[in-house]
Image (cartoon, rainbow, N blue to C red):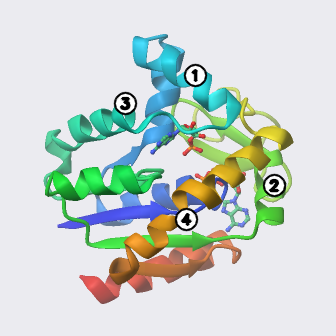
Amino acid sequence: MLRIILLGPPGAGKGTQAHKIIEQYRIPQISTGDILRHETKIQSDIGIKAQEYMSKGALVPDDVIIAIVKKRLLEKDCVNGFLLDGFPRTVGQAEALRDANIDIDAVILLEVNDDEIVERLGGRLVHPASGRVYHIHTHPPKSAGIDDVTGEPLIQRQDDKEETIRQRLRVYHSQTSPLIQFYQSKLIEVDGEKSTSEVFADIQAGIQKIV
Ligand code: ADP
Ligand code: AMP
């Protein structure tokens, strides 16, 4: 059983590391951002509502997000654990997990400074269907604008504009960073500014200590 939370500012590398973690530990990735973008794409009621907040770089209200995650965690593939990527993002969301008796084994905090975040997100390219991420300079796809695996086009996220990135960082520092204190006893701190493979090695070393 391995129940992990990936915590860190937008652009810290949560999605990048999540793909490696789920492959290694055979647990599902639950990315609330990916779920919301899917809902937006199919224009469901939740998606239409969420879009307003996401495009401004604001957080979607706790009640909406908590309901989505609780439902997802009841699915069969979560019996041996799960990786929460981008949830919780407020103390209210963390309290909702605790109050639902959903235990967490470890919280991995990826630490990256704000200037590096702006640089990373400004150059991020995404394959929406899989959640695979690239960077225009530091991790380019083999063929410009095309996903390596499927050959489908890559996109730049609407909220990866500098002004919205700065807003998302403000939201992180005010609403999400209090979770570092909340999860103090379960925290595995990782320097997210190292290379992707070094970060993954540090994450594995951290998980090794708790299993
Ligand atoms: P998050 O899911 O935390 O928002 P991503 O995994 O999408 O972050 O990464 C944001 C951007 O930073 C992407 O363009 C990705 O390629 C790049 N990136 C991720 N990890 C690293 C790293 N260790 N060093 C440099 N760039 C990285
Ligand atoms: P992400 O893909 O994790 O960068 O999330 C993109 C956007 O989705 C965020 O800027 C929020 O608007 C919304 N979002 C994702 N996860 C949450 C969450 N746990 N709580 C509130 N809003 C969220």
**Would you say the residues marked 3 and 1 are in contact, meaning their CB atoms lie under 8 Å apart?**
no
Q: CA distance from mark 4 to mark 3?
A: 21 Å
| Residue of label 4 | 177
Please state if 95 lies on the left or on the right of 107 as rendered. left
Ligand 2 within 8 Å, label 3 CB: yes
- Which one is in front, 59 or 134? 59
Disc nearer the start of the sequence (3/1): 1
How many residues crowd mark 1 within 10 Å: few (<14), some (14–19), many (20+)? some
Disc nearer the start of the sequence (4/2): 2
| Residue of label 1 | 51
Amino acid at the residue labelled 2: Val
Q: Is disc 1 placed on a helix, strand or loop?
A: helix
Q: Is disc 4 placed on a helix, strand or loop?
A: loop
- Residue 163 numbered tag: none
- Which one is in front, 79 or 55? 55
Residue 85 in view: yes
